[in-house]
Image (cartoon, rainbow, N blue to C red):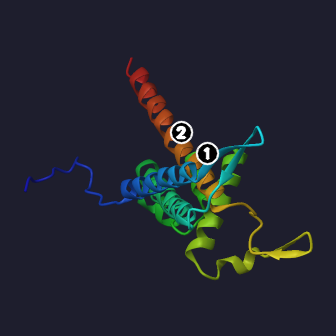
Amino acid sequence: MENLDQTSPPLVLTRYREFYIIAKEAFHSMKTLLDDAVEIRIIDGEISTIKSWDKGKSYRQAMICTVFGVTFLEAYTHLKIVKTFGENSAISLDRKTLKDKFDKLGITDEEIINLSERVRDVRNMISHEKAYIRHRELVDGKKYDSPYFSTAQDEAEKTIFLVDFVIEYFRDKDKLDNFMKEMSSY
């Protein structure tokens, strides 16, 4: 094995890419299952769309997408914080919310922050059997387990939107940082 000199970055073993791949594959499987479950029929001269039940397969893919999408975001933001601010900053933010991590990394858009809180809560409701208890609220006089009353597939869409946003944000930010470094050398 080759010796690494003092200027070489430390070897970091991480699975964040696998988390991303699992989330994206589950998302695409979910979309395919939903597309396959739609049947268009003409009844009495009217076009109607009929959704058939996919036996919960798209629901399961949506849950996988959400869990691994948020897991990716947590791992990815952790690595960005380590790279940008150092390990001590990352350790101090380790059990904090995505909102706190985004704030540290300069993501301040209120809609994105709210979305990060939402997908994290949904992931926790999926991953932790009793996490829903703190989310009970009355809606039209009925108790629902979550203030996020939508389908798992909708939540997966939101999760993938946030994943893609964060990746693009840092891709653009890294390009800008590199450009600024180049310009400062003139």
Q: Toward the viewer: 95 or 112?
A: 112
The numbered disc on residue 56 is: none
Q: Is residue 12 visible?
A: yes
The image position of residue 134, as x and y in percent, is 73, 78
Q: Residue type at mark 2: give it.
A: Tyr
Tag 1: residue type? Ile
Residue at left offset 53%, top offset 39%: 169
Drawn side of residue 133 relative to residue 13, left or right? right
On residue 169, the disc is 2
Q: Secondary structure at mark 2?
A: helix
CB of mark 1 within 8 Å of CB of mark 2?
yes
Residue 4 vertical position relative to residue 145 in the rendered view, above or below: above
Tally of numbered discs: 2
Label 1 residue SS:
loop
Q: Earlier in the sequence, mark 1 or mark 2?
A: 1
Quarter occupied by the N terminus: bottom left
Whether residue 185 sits left or right of residue 104 in the image: it is left
Where residue 41 appears, as percent x and y from the top left, is 67, 45
Q: Residue at x 53, y 49 (%)?
A: 163
Q: Residue furthest left?
A: 1
Rendered position, 45 above or below 69:
above
Q: Residue at x 60, y 81 (%)?
A: 129
Q: Residue 2, relative to residue 176: is it above or below? A: below
Task: Tell me the quarter of the picture where residue 46 sits.
Answer: top right
- Residue toward you, 123 or 175: 123
In what quadrant of the picture does the C terminus appear?
Answer: top left
Query: Callout 2: few (<14), some (14-19), or many (20+) C-alpha neighbours within 10 Å?
Result: some
Residue 12 coordinates in the image, percent (x, y): 30, 58
* Neighbourhood count class around disc 1 (C-alpha, 10 Å): few under 14, some 14–19, many 20 upward: some
* Numbered label attached to residue 107: 1
